[in-house]
Amino acid sequence: MKDTPKALLFDLNGTIIDDMHYHAEAWHHVLTKDLGADLTWDEVKVQMYGKNEEVLARIFGEDHFSDEEVRKLSSDKESYYQEAYKPHLKLIDGLHNFLAEAAAHPVKVAIATAAITGNVDYIVDNLGIRQYFDEFVSADDVENSKPDPETFLKAAEKLQEKPEDCVVFEDSAKGVESARNAGMRCIVITTAHPKEEFEEYENVIGFIQDYNDPLIKNFFQKDDK
Ligand SMILES: O=P(O)(O)OC[C@H]1O[C@@H](O)[C@H](O)[C@@H](O)[C@@H]1O
Protein backbone atom coordinates (compact mmCIF):
# COMPACT_ATOMS: atom_id res chain seq x y z
CA MET A 1 0.00 0.00 0.00
CA LYS A 2 1.18 3.55 -0.80
CA ASP A 3 2.06 5.45 2.40
CA THR A 4 1.99 2.35 4.58
CA PRO A 5 0.51 3.41 7.94
CA LYS A 6 2.24 3.14 11.31
CA ALA A 7 -0.96 2.05 13.05
CA LEU A 8 -4.09 0.09 12.16
CA LEU A 9 -7.20 0.94 14.19
CA PHE A 10 -9.95 -1.66 13.97
CA ASP A 11 -13.53 -0.97 14.84
CA LEU A 12 -14.98 -4.12 16.47
CA ASN A 13 -18.61 -4.81 15.59
CA GLY A 14 -19.14 -5.32 11.87
CA THR A 15 -15.39 -5.00 11.21
CA ILE A 16 -13.69 -7.79 13.13
CA ILE A 17 -16.83 -9.90 13.38
CA ASP A 18 -20.00 -9.79 11.29
CA ASP A 19 -22.40 -9.27 14.22
CA MET A 20 -24.37 -6.05 13.57
CA HIS A 21 -27.55 -8.04 12.91
CA TYR A 22 -27.37 -9.41 16.49
CA HIS A 23 -26.87 -5.92 17.96
CA ALA A 24 -29.94 -4.76 16.02
CA GLU A 25 -31.97 -7.70 17.34
CA ALA A 26 -30.86 -7.06 20.93
CA TRP A 27 -31.61 -3.34 20.70
CA HIS A 28 -34.95 -4.01 19.02
CA HIS A 29 -35.88 -6.37 21.88
CA VAL A 30 -34.90 -3.93 24.64
CA LEU A 31 -36.39 -0.86 22.99
CA THR A 32 -39.69 -2.25 21.72
CA LYS A 33 -40.44 -5.28 23.96
CA ASP A 34 -38.88 -4.24 27.29
CA LEU A 35 -39.42 -0.47 27.01
CA GLY A 36 -42.45 -0.39 24.68
CA ALA A 37 -40.98 2.16 22.27
CA ASP A 38 -42.78 2.47 18.94
CA LEU A 39 -39.80 1.89 16.64
CA THR A 40 -39.50 -0.14 13.45
CA TRP A 41 -36.52 -2.42 12.78
CA ASP A 42 -35.08 0.20 10.37
CA GLU A 43 -35.52 2.99 12.91
CA VAL A 44 -33.66 0.94 15.51
CA LYS A 45 -30.80 0.38 13.06
CA VAL A 46 -30.52 4.12 12.36
CA GLN A 47 -30.25 4.91 16.08
CA MET A 48 -27.78 2.13 16.83
CA TYR A 49 -24.42 3.87 17.01
CA GLY A 50 -22.16 5.12 19.75
CA LYS A 51 -22.29 4.11 23.42
CA ASN A 52 -25.39 2.40 24.81
CA GLU A 53 -26.22 5.40 27.03
CA GLU A 54 -25.98 7.66 23.96
CA VAL A 55 -28.42 5.42 22.06
CA LEU A 56 -30.90 5.58 24.97
CA ALA A 57 -30.51 9.36 25.37
CA ARG A 58 -31.08 9.95 21.63
CA ILE A 59 -34.32 7.99 21.68
CA PHE A 60 -35.82 8.87 25.08
CA GLY A 61 -34.12 12.20 25.96
CA GLU A 62 -31.13 13.00 28.17
CA ASP A 63 -32.52 12.47 31.68
CA HIS A 64 -35.28 9.96 31.01
CA PHE A 65 -33.51 7.08 32.83
CA SER A 66 -31.49 7.08 36.04
CA ASP A 67 -27.85 5.96 35.83
CA GLU A 68 -28.88 2.68 37.45
CA GLU A 69 -31.61 2.10 34.85
CA VAL A 70 -29.19 2.88 32.01
CA ARG A 71 -26.71 0.37 33.43
CA LYS A 72 -29.44 -2.31 33.69
CA LEU A 73 -30.78 -1.67 30.15
CA SER A 74 -27.29 -1.69 28.71
CA SER A 75 -26.44 -4.90 30.51
CA ASP A 76 -29.73 -6.53 29.32
CA LYS A 77 -28.95 -5.52 25.75
CA GLU A 78 -25.46 -7.04 25.92
CA SER A 79 -26.80 -10.27 27.48
CA TYR A 80 -29.34 -10.69 24.66
CA TYR A 81 -26.61 -9.92 22.13
CA GLN A 82 -23.97 -12.26 23.57
CA GLU A 83 -26.38 -15.16 23.90
CA ALA A 84 -27.79 -14.80 20.38
CA TYR A 85 -24.42 -14.22 18.70
CA LYS A 86 -22.43 -16.91 20.56
CA PRO A 87 -23.15 -19.82 18.12
CA HIS A 88 -22.04 -17.61 15.21
CA LEU A 89 -18.89 -16.18 16.76
CA LYS A 90 -16.12 -16.09 14.13
CA LEU A 91 -13.61 -13.69 12.64
CA ILE A 92 -14.41 -12.13 9.27
CA ASP A 93 -12.75 -14.13 6.47
CA GLY A 94 -9.06 -13.44 5.96
CA LEU A 95 -8.67 -11.35 9.13
CA HIS A 96 -6.65 -13.90 11.05
CA ASN A 97 -4.00 -13.98 8.30
CA PHE A 98 -3.99 -10.20 8.04
CA LEU A 99 -3.48 -9.79 11.81
CA ALA A 100 -0.65 -12.36 11.74
CA GLU A 101 0.94 -10.52 8.83
CA ALA A 102 0.62 -7.18 10.64
CA ALA A 103 2.35 -8.72 13.67
CA ALA A 104 5.33 -9.51 11.44
CA HIS A 105 5.57 -5.88 10.25
CA PRO A 106 6.48 -2.65 12.05
CA VAL A 107 2.88 -1.53 12.49
CA LYS A 108 0.90 -1.08 15.72
CA VAL A 109 -2.62 -2.44 15.99
CA ALA A 110 -5.56 -1.41 18.21
CA ILE A 111 -9.27 -2.00 18.63
CA ALA A 112 -11.21 1.27 18.83
CA THR A 113 -14.91 0.63 19.42
CA ALA A 114 -18.17 2.00 20.77
CA ALA A 115 -18.76 -1.34 22.49
CA ILE A 116 -18.29 -1.76 26.24
CA THR A 117 -15.09 -3.41 27.53
CA GLY A 118 -17.10 -6.51 28.49
CA ASN A 119 -18.02 -7.10 24.84
CA VAL A 120 -14.46 -6.46 23.65
CA ASP A 121 -13.20 -9.08 26.12
CA TYR A 122 -15.99 -11.48 25.15
CA ILE A 123 -15.03 -11.32 21.46
CA VAL A 124 -11.26 -11.09 21.74
CA ASP A 125 -10.88 -13.86 24.35
CA ASN A 126 -13.39 -16.27 22.82
CA LEU A 127 -11.62 -15.90 19.47
CA GLY A 128 -8.13 -16.06 21.02
CA ILE A 129 -6.85 -12.95 19.22
CA ARG A 130 -5.76 -10.71 22.14
CA GLN A 131 -2.06 -11.10 21.31
CA TYR A 132 -2.51 -9.25 18.00
CA PHE A 133 -3.52 -5.95 19.63
CA ASP A 134 -1.27 -3.39 21.33
CA GLU A 135 -4.12 -1.28 22.74
CA PHE A 136 -7.89 -1.23 23.23
CA VAL A 137 -10.27 1.73 23.44
CA SER A 138 -13.89 0.98 24.33
CA ALA A 139 -17.03 2.88 25.37
CA ASP A 140 -15.71 2.86 28.93
CA ASP A 141 -12.62 4.88 27.96
CA VAL A 142 -14.30 7.88 26.32
CA GLU A 143 -16.64 10.70 27.20
CA ASN A 144 -18.16 10.87 23.70
CA SER A 145 -18.31 7.94 21.33
CA LYS A 146 -18.53 7.82 17.51
CA PRO A 147 -19.05 10.01 15.42
CA ASP A 148 -17.02 12.10 17.88
CA PRO A 149 -13.30 11.54 17.12
CA GLU A 150 -12.39 10.74 20.75
CA THR A 151 -12.30 6.93 20.35
CA PHE A 152 -9.83 7.00 17.44
CA LEU A 153 -7.77 9.91 18.82
CA LYS A 154 -7.39 8.09 22.13
CA ALA A 155 -6.25 4.93 20.33
CA ALA A 156 -3.65 6.93 18.35
CA GLU A 157 -2.49 8.61 21.56
CA LYS A 158 -2.15 5.27 23.36
CA LEU A 159 -0.13 3.92 20.42
CA GLN A 160 1.89 7.16 20.31
CA GLU A 161 1.18 7.70 16.63
CA LYS A 162 -0.17 10.72 14.72
CA PRO A 163 -3.68 10.60 13.21
CA GLU A 164 -2.26 10.94 9.68
CA ASP A 165 -0.17 7.80 10.25
CA CYS A 166 -3.21 5.71 11.20
CA VAL A 167 -5.57 3.75 8.96
CA VAL A 168 -8.99 2.93 10.38
CA PHE A 169 -11.07 -0.13 9.43
CA GLU A 170 -14.81 0.58 9.76
CA ASP A 171 -18.18 -0.75 8.62
CA SER A 172 -20.55 2.13 9.48
CA ALA A 173 -21.02 5.70 8.26
CA LYS A 174 -20.88 7.06 11.83
CA GLY A 175 -17.59 5.24 12.34
CA VAL A 176 -16.14 6.61 9.10
CA GLU A 177 -17.33 10.07 10.15
CA SER A 178 -15.56 9.60 13.48
CA ALA A 179 -12.33 8.68 11.64
CA ARG A 180 -12.75 11.73 9.39
CA ASN A 181 -13.24 13.94 12.45
CA ALA A 182 -10.01 12.45 13.83
CA GLY A 183 -8.15 13.23 10.57
CA MET A 184 -7.67 9.56 9.67
CA ARG A 185 -7.89 7.55 6.44
CA CYS A 186 -10.41 4.75 6.41
CA ILE A 187 -10.95 1.40 4.70
CA VAL A 188 -14.61 0.40 4.69
CA ILE A 189 -15.71 -3.21 5.03
CA THR A 190 -19.15 -3.66 3.49
CA THR A 191 -20.52 -6.24 5.97
CA ALA A 192 -23.48 -4.15 7.19
CA HIS A 193 -23.72 -1.20 4.79
CA PRO A 194 -23.30 -0.89 1.00
CA LYS A 195 -20.64 1.31 -0.65
CA GLU A 196 -23.26 3.92 -1.64
CA GLU A 197 -23.78 4.95 2.00
CA PHE A 198 -20.23 6.30 2.19
CA GLU A 199 -20.17 8.64 -0.83
CA GLU A 200 -19.83 11.83 1.21
CA TYR A 201 -16.71 10.67 3.07
CA GLU A 202 -13.51 11.78 1.35
CA ASN A 203 -11.34 9.98 3.94
CA VAL A 204 -12.37 6.56 2.53
CA ILE A 205 -9.39 5.08 0.67
CA GLY A 206 -10.91 1.72 -0.25
CA PHE A 207 -13.75 -0.77 0.11
CA ILE A 208 -13.41 -4.47 0.92
CA GLN A 209 -15.95 -7.28 1.34
CA ASP A 210 -13.62 -9.23 3.61
CA TYR A 211 -9.88 -9.46 4.37
CA ASN A 212 -9.15 -11.72 1.38
CA ASP A 213 -9.54 -8.65 -0.84
CA PRO A 214 -6.51 -7.76 -3.06
CA LEU A 215 -6.25 -4.41 -1.23
CA ILE A 216 -5.49 -6.35 1.97
CA LYS A 217 -3.33 -8.98 0.26
CA ASN A 218 -1.13 -6.15 -1.10
CA PHE A 219 -1.32 -4.04 2.04
CA PHE A 220 2.31 -4.40 3.13
CA GLN A 221 3.76 -4.74 -0.37
CA LYS A 222 5.71 -1.46 -0.33
CA ASP A 223 7.46 -2.49 2.93
CA ASP A 224 8.57 -5.78 1.45
CA LYS A 225 10.44 -4.30 -1.52
O1 LIG B 1 -17.90 0.88 17.28
P1 LIG B 1 -18.41 -0.50 16.94
O2 LIG B 1 -17.42 -1.56 17.25
O3 LIG B 1 -18.94 -0.59 15.55
O4 LIG B 1 -19.64 -0.80 17.88
C1 LIG B 1 -20.91 -0.27 17.61
C2 LIG B 1 -22.00 -0.89 18.45
O5 LIG B 1 -21.55 -1.19 19.72
C3 LIG B 1 -22.55 -1.83 20.52
O6 LIG B 1 -22.01 -2.26 21.71
C4 LIG B 1 -23.66 -0.86 20.77
O7 LIG B 1 -24.63 -1.42 21.62
C5 LIG B 1 -24.25 -0.56 19.44
O8 LIG B 1 -25.31 0.31 19.61
C6 LIG B 1 -23.19 0.02 18.52
O9 LIG B 1 -23.73 0.13 17.24
Image (spheres, rainbow, N blue to C red):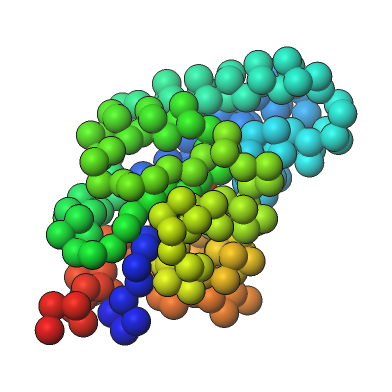
Q: Quadrant of ligand 1?
A: top right
**Please, is residue 152 above or below residue 40 in the view?**
below
Residue at the location (48% across, 68% down)? Answer: 162
- Please state if 59 lies on the left or on the right of 74 as rendered: right
- Give the x, y percent position of residue 152: 53, 56
Camera sees residue 38 = no
Residue at the location (33% across, 47% down)? Answer: 134
Residue at the location (31% across, 76% down)? Answer: 4
- Please state if 193 lies on the left or on the right of 31 as rendered: left
- Give the x, y percent position of residue 3: 34, 81
Residue at the location (41% across, 55% down)? Answer: 159
Asked which quadrant contains residue 139, the reply is top right
Q: Where does the C terminus fall, quadrant-wise?
A: bottom left
- Please state if 107 lies on the left or on the right of 57 as rendered: left
> Extreme front residue here?
160
- Give the x, y percent position of residue 125: 29, 30
**Please, is residue 64 above or below residue 189 in the view?**
above
Q: Where does the N terminus fall, quadrant-wise?
A: bottom left
- Please state if 73 lies on the left or on the right of 219 as rendered: right
Camera sees residue 35 = yes
The number of numbered badges drawn on the structure is: 0
